[in-house]
Image (cartoon, rainbow, N blue to C red):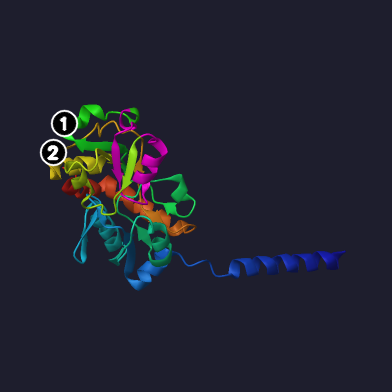
Amino acid sequence: MITRVVVFMLWSFTAVTVTYGQDAPVSRLDAVQKSGKLRVCTPGDYTPFALQKGDAFEGLDVDLVSSAAKALGAEPVFVKSGWPTLMKDFIEKCDVAVGGISVTLDRQKTAYFSRAYMVNGKAPITRCENVGKYQTVADIDKPGVTVIENPGGSNERFARANFKAARIVIYADNTTIFDEILKGNADVMISESAETIVQQKLRPGLCAVNPDKPLQYGEMAWLLPRGDAAFKAWIDQWIHLAKANGEYDRIVGRWLR
């Protein structure tokens, strides 16, 4: 009986030793610090969050993630993506994805999100003379109304989920899509309220429709590798501290005035 107990104790000790002796999975946090590079996927076509200009990128998210990279002792390396392929590109090529990414349950199935850094719901933008016509989803979802959206993102998903009578046009160039409304090729676009505010300043003749009372609640966050709790904890803490020490407000203030 004693022999069996001793054997069992030895087996248990060996099992515990093997378990704890196994190498823990390497976190992206360690890999980024070791390489000195933070690979950042972004579509780079979404003012004010991330916009590609030549070989460079600029915007609110670009400044934020560059500051986070600096805190890690790393250099941000931006990888151009597209909205339809963003998740695939992120998983295969990057450590983080940024650029005005809406938090969705569908994306959450494949990747982690950082803590949300901005509340930013869906709002219409249209020619100023039509603001009164497109106040609600029901106002927009009518025969004869053309809704224009960029492909592959949450804007297109919102339009397809909510507009059954209106005509939906998908336009690939997110940097010139708002000009299509000014030209009369579309009546309205649904986008994040922050972008509608910026675009009405950039393009006289366009007006955001109730951006302070969006059609749908939304949050913006960064995509992070699924299962990497250490990396997510560090990014979340960085965002928290950036908001607490005023760095976040200074960066946002440069892009959202």
**Circle 1 residues within 10 Å: few <14, some 14–19, many ≥20:** few
Identify which residue, 65 or 43, lies in the foreground: 43
Residue 81 occupies quadrant: bottom left
Q: Please provide percent x and percent y for residue 51.
A: 22, 56
The answer to whether residue 116 is seen in the rendering is no
Q: How many labels does the image show?
A: 2
Q: Can you say which quadrant of the picture contains the C terminus?
A: top left
The residue that disc 1 covers is 129
Q: Please provide percent x and percent y for residue 158.
A: 38, 41
Report the amino acid beneath label 1.
Glu
Q: Please provide percent x and percent y for residue 213.
A: 29, 30
47 to the left or right of 118 = left
Q: Which residue is drawn at 37% across and 34% down?
A: 165
The residue that disc 2 covers is 205
Q: Which callout, 2 or 1, points at the residue further toward the start of the chain?
A: 1
Identify which residue, 183 or 221, lies in the foreground: 183
Q: Which stretch did the figure color magenta?
A: 139-165
**Circle 2 residues within 10 Å: few <14, some 14–19, many ≥20:** some
Q: Are marks 2 and 1 in contact (CB under 8 Å)?
A: no
Residue 15 is one of the magenta-drawn residues: no
Q: Mark 2 falls on what kind of element?
A: loop
Q: Which residue is drawn at 33% across and 53% down?
A: 238
**Numbered tag placed on residue 217 in the rendering:** none
Report the amino acid beneath label 2.
Gly
Q: Residue at x 33, y 39 (%)?
A: 167
